[in-house]
Amino acid sequence: MAKQELYEYQYTTPNKQVVKAFLPALKKPKGRSGPNKKVTWGIIFQLIGIVGFITMPQMVADGAGVFSLLSKMIVHGILLVAGIIQVRQGREGLNRLERYFRYMRVFEGRPYASIEELASTVAKKPKTVMKDLEYMMDEGWFLEAHLDTKQNYFMLTNQAYQQFNEAEKSKRLREKEEQEKQARENDPAAKELDRILEEGKEYIREIRRLNDEIAGEEVSNKLYAIEDVVGSIFEQVKRKPEKMTDIRKFMQYYLPMTVKVVRTYRDFENENLPSAQLEESKKEIEETLDKVQAAFVKLREKLFAEDVLDVSTDLDVLETMMSQEGLISDEFK
């Protein structure tokens, strides 16, 4: 890109450093000379046209022919219309330039503004502001400008546009989450699922907390394995809420008792007095934890069994259909 002449602010700002941060995104407009020339030439064309029409009665009196009169009428009429258009375009250019400087006052210290705010600044309708901004972008007065998809906000820099989109994305995500939350609150089954999942997370957090307080590495590994299995069970229920009834005993008895046993082990380990009975109880708990893990793994497999069966059935149907169509050979099947 050719070297751009940067727009220099004519107004004071409380934070010039912020303004300078997005100055490269702006280009200095060509100024008033162009619109002023249009106004000047427009006035000249109008005067020539008016003078031409004023002298036409004298031409008639002097016996000018119809062709001469018609030619002069057309030429001077064109000049008059062209002059009117030139003056209008020149004045519009001057007005737009003035509005540009007024827009810049809004952008001092920040690289964005709402269309409504800009419209209020210049006392124009938002539609007029949109036309102004589109013209200014086409003319290169704004080198990095963007409008949001709803055309409610105008941003001077690519960075501001990116930040705006990220904020809008976060806003839509929050709104979606809030809508889903409202829908779940009105759905008893969904509320029950949320309760079970939250209760499951609490059990997992408690097992992790107790594990952190237990020094024995072997027991800790057992607890990590149990925590992993428990987490996968709740993930499966989250994907398939209809399986909530299959983990009722798991929630009401197995998990609470497991946490109670682990807590007891933690308490035994914290006892400072050596005791053969305590050591025997700890060993018994360690063996029980192995059984608990095995039982939980079996429950997880039971939850997955229906899905595995469904997949196997789908595969059999798919192979049968392809075989009937001659797409696969019996040997391949």
Image (spheres, rainbow, N blue to C red):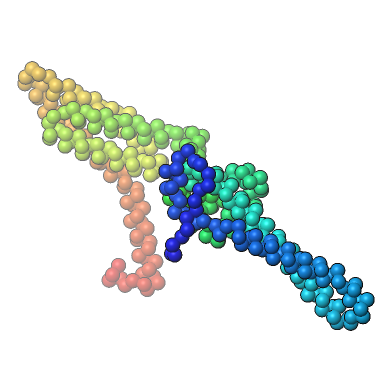
Please determine whether, in this image, residue 187 is positioned above or below residue 45. above
Horizontal side of 223 relative to 26 (left or right) equals left
Give above or below for 27 relative to 292.
below
The image quarter containing residue 92 is: bottom right
Q: Quadrant of residue 3?
A: bottom left
Looking at the image, how many numbered discs can be counted on the residues?
A: 0
Q: Is residue 273 above or below residue 97?
A: above
Give percent across and percent down for residue 165. Answer: 46, 49
- In x, y percent, where is residue 108? 50, 44
288 or 97, which is in the foreground? 97
Can you say which quadrant of the picture contains the C terminus? bottom left
Q: Quadrant of residue 75?
A: bottom right
Q: Residue at x 45, y 43 (%)?
A: 16
Q: Is residue 210 left or right of residue 176?
A: left
Residue 197 in sight from this viewpoint: yes
Q: Relative to the observer, which residue lies in front, 106 or 48?
A: 48
Left or right: 315 in relation to 122: left
